Image (tube, rainbow, N blue to C red):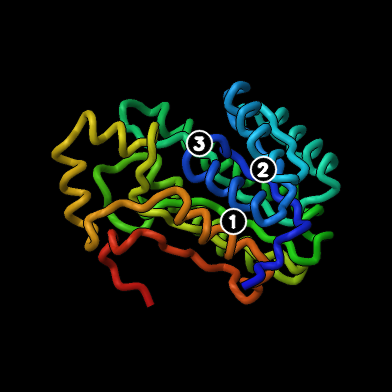
């Protein structure tokens, strides 16, 4: 099936590792010009080289999304360099943690406000596209009780509500907005590799909760994001896609 992505322009945040990296790799393979950011200049340079080898236009930047002014300036300059923006994927996250109140501020500024600022800054470009699409990366931590009460879970839940309401607000301008909730995703250098090495009991109990006995991969999530972002998913907006290999147990109608 042709997803209709070739020639589109996508801006993806947090795209040098894990799910974000898999997303930009797949989009570039589909012929999408890519703008992306991450914190590490070295990782940005390596990722830009790998994506450019696929024959698409690539604009990478080392950006701290907590710096609102710098982040918005980067988004604007990147959209200009790409000559537009059809797809925005908000993937940056501060991750989990509950050691202090700082976690709440960090998750709010990174997970929530980077998403809001990205949507607001790029909205005019997305409207001009005629097929604008926003995909917000949330988490199954947002939809069921998981581990312990922490900022990450609460802020990821806020993003689902924001996504749904934004989809209604911009739908008349032909901009679709959806969220994706990955379940446990394992990759080298990722959170679950760290948990496996530091809390084997918790890791094993999580594995037992997955019917197939395996965690997902970044590439599997990327395929879902690519479809949802594409014109092939033109009827899907305001939805929250759970991609967890059966990890969550709630029944949702």
Q: Residue at x 67, y 33 (%)?
A: 48
Horizontal placement of 97 versus 57: left or right? left
Circle 3 is placed at which residue position? 17
Per the model, the C-alpha gap separating discs 2 and 1 is 14 Å
Q: Secondary structure at mark 2?
A: helix
Q: Secondary structure at mark 1?
A: strand
Whether tag 2 and tag 1 are in contact, CB under 8 A, the answer is no
Q: Which residue is mark 1?
A: 135
Q: Are marks 3 and 2 in contact (CB under 8 Å)?
A: no
Q: CA distance from mark 3 to mark 2?
A: 22 Å
Residue in the image at 48% along x and 64% along y: 240
Task: Say which label, 3 or 1, has the lower sequence index.
Answer: 3
Disc 3 or disc 1, which is closer to the eye? Answer: 3
Q: Which class describes the residues within 10 Å of circle 2: few (<14), some (14-19), or many (20+)?
A: some
Q: How many numbered circles does the render carry?
A: 3
Q: Is residue 109 visible?
A: no
* Label 2 sits on residue: 117
Q: Quadrant of residue 163?
A: bottom right
Kindly identify which numbered label has been placed on residue 181: none
């Amino acid at each position: 099936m042709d997803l209709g992505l070739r020639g589109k322009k996508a801006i993806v945040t947090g795209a040098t590792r894990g799910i974000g990296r898999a997303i930009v790799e797949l989009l570039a393979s589909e012929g999408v010009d890519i703008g992306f950011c991450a914190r590490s200049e070295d990782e940005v340079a390596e990722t830009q080289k790998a994506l450019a080898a696929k024959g698409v236009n690539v604009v990478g930047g080392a950006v701290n999304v907590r710096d609102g002014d710098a982040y918005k300036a980067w988004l604007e300059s990147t959209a200009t360099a790409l000559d537009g923006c059809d797809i925005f994927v908000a993937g940056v996250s501060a991750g989990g943690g509950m050691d202090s109140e700082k976690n709440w501020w960090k998750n709010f500024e990174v997970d929530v406000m980077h998403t809001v600022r990205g949507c607001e800054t790029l909205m005019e470009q997305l409207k001009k596209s005629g097929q604008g699409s926003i995909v917000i990366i949330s988490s199954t931590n947002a939809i069921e009780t998981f581990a312990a009460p922490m900022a990450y879970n609460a802020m990821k839940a806020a993003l689902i509500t924001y996504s749904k309401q934004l989809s209604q607000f911009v739908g008349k301008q032909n901009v679709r907005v959806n969220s994706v909730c990955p379940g446990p995703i394992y990759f080298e250098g990722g959170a679950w590799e760290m948990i496996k090495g530091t809390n084997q009991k918790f890791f094993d109990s999580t594995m037992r909760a997955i019917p197939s006995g395996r965690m997902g991969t970044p590439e599997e999530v990327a395929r879902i994001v690519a479809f949802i972002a594409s014109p092939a998913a033109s009827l899907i907006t305001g939805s929250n896609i759970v991609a967890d290999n059966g990890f969550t147990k709630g029944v949702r109608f």
